[in-house]
């Protein structure tokens, strides 16, 4: 039994033997419906989460991503760290938690997914037994596209051996048609050891051990970011090299060979993830949340295969229009700096 929280949903899950599915659903349903939020238990868990926040704050390679999102979307929930802040966690009361559950944990918010050796009819019967009389809908905030800042350079001064940095900009979300081209673009640029950034920053120039890119996509939007770690005396060169690679792919796009490799890598990743029952569970649940249906794997593969070089080039010209004005967040032995924000 365990749980995790994402930017847009919380998942309570169990991994059990097939014969224990009834017990697992019983336990999860009981936790979901009947948690007491005893004051002593809440206080104990608050201490645990506060320690988790301290642990995150002591790890610059983790902290820098939260700080970047906060800088990019300062006035939107997507800019807030999932774990919260020490102040918000410490201020929570059992009453706050009960109130949140009453508002947000109604029948309209529940999606049950099961993967593995299970019987659909049995699972349906068990869900009806444990959750069939669950009333209420779910309090939902209006969907609002986040307003991104640009041109912010924000440094958190720390006496570390390396500078950990994130450079990025707003991009597209899981509901946007561009999501498949964005995944391909990310793969070409920085999502593997054969990517352009890895080859240029690490293999050719030796500027750092860790370098890569990622596309965070959510319902209301998302962002594209490059992350790396380098020595203070090579930080400026590393940033300029990253910007140059973004400009290069913006101006010239990707070759047919690069696109073929990226699509093959994306296909392999999607297919091989299905070997994990937990990955299947997560994919089904997220698909229901975002699209209101289970998107077949074959459909995702077909959409990925349909991405063209022209689509990738058009996307790069949009997302990487001005690499020199992308936000940069860094942690390390740097001068404290924060340039006034601009919104786009």
Image: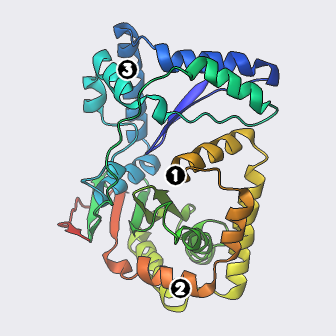
> Which part of the image, by quadrant, shows the C terminus?
bottom left
Q: Nearer the viewer, mark 2 or mark 3?
A: 2
Is label 2 in a helix, a strand or a loop?
helix
Q: Is 213 left or right of 295, judged from the image as shown?
A: left
Q: Position of residue 291 (x, y in %)?
A: 54, 54
Q: Earlier in the sequence, mark 2 or mark 3?
A: 3
Residue drawn at x 52%, y 20% as measured from the top left:
133
Task: Tell me which corner region of the image, top left, top right, bottom left or bottom right, holds residue 3.
Answer: top right
Q: Are marks 1 and 3 in contact (CB under 8 Å)?
A: no
- Residue hosting label 3: 47
Q: Position of residue 40 (x, y in %)?
A: 37, 8
Considering every residue shown, the one lying at the far bottom of the view is 252
Q: How many marks?
A: 3
- Residue hosting label 2: 313
Task: Tell me which corner region of the image, top left, top right, bottom left or bottom right, holds residue 239.
Answer: bottom left
Residue drawn at x 71%, y 27% as measured from the top left:
123
Above or below, 30 relative to 332: above
- Residue hosting label 1: 290
Is label 1 in a helix, a strand or a loop?
helix
> Which part of the image, by quadrant, shows the N terminus?
top right
Q: Position of residue 139 (x, y in %)?
A: 35, 36
Q: Is 62 left or right of 192, judged from the image as shown?
A: left
């Amino acid at each position: 039994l365990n749980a995790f929280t994402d930017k847009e949903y919380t998942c309570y899950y169990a991994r059990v033997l097939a014969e224990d599915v009834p017990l697992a659903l019983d336990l999860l349903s009981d936790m979901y419906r009947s948690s007491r939020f005893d004051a002593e238990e809440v206080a104990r868990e608050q201490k645990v989460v506060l320690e988790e926040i301290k642990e995150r704050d002591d790890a610059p390679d983790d902290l820098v991503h939260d700080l970047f999102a906060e800088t990019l979307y300062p006035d939107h929930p997507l800019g807030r760290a999932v774990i919260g802040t020490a102040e918000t966690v410490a201020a929570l009361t059992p009453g706050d938690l009960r109130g949140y559950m009453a508002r947000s944990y109604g029948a309209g918010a529940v999606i049950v997914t099961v993967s593995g050796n299970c019987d659909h009819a049995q699972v349906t019967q068990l869900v009806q037994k444990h959750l069939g009389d669950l009333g209420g809908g779910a309090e939902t905030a209006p969907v609002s596209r986040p307003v991104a800042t640009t041109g912010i350079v924000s440094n958190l001064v720390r006496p570390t051996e390396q500078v950990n940095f994130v450079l990025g900009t707003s991009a597209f979300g899981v509901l946007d048609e561009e999501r498949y081209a964005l995944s391909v673009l990310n793969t070409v640029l920085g999502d593997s050891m054969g990517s352009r950034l890895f080859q240029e920053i690490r293999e050719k120039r030796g500027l750092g051990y860790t370098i890569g890119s990622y596309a965070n996509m959510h319902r209301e939007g998302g962002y594209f970011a490059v992350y790396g770690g380098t020595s203070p005396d090579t930080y400026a060169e590393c940033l300029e090299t990253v910007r140059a690679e973004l400009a290069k792919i913006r101006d010239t796009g990707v070759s047919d060979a690069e696109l073929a490799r990226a699509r093959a890598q994306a296909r392999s990743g999607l297919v091989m993830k299905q070997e994990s029952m937990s990955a299947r569970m997560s994919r089904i649940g997220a698909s229901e949340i975002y699209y209101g249906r289970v998107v077949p794997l074959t459909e995702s593969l077909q959409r990925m295969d349909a991405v063209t070089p022209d689509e990738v080039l058009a996307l790069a010209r949009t997302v990487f229009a001005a690499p020199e004005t992308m936000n940069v967040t860094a942690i390390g032995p740097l001068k404290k700096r924060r340039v006034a924000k601009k919104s786009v």
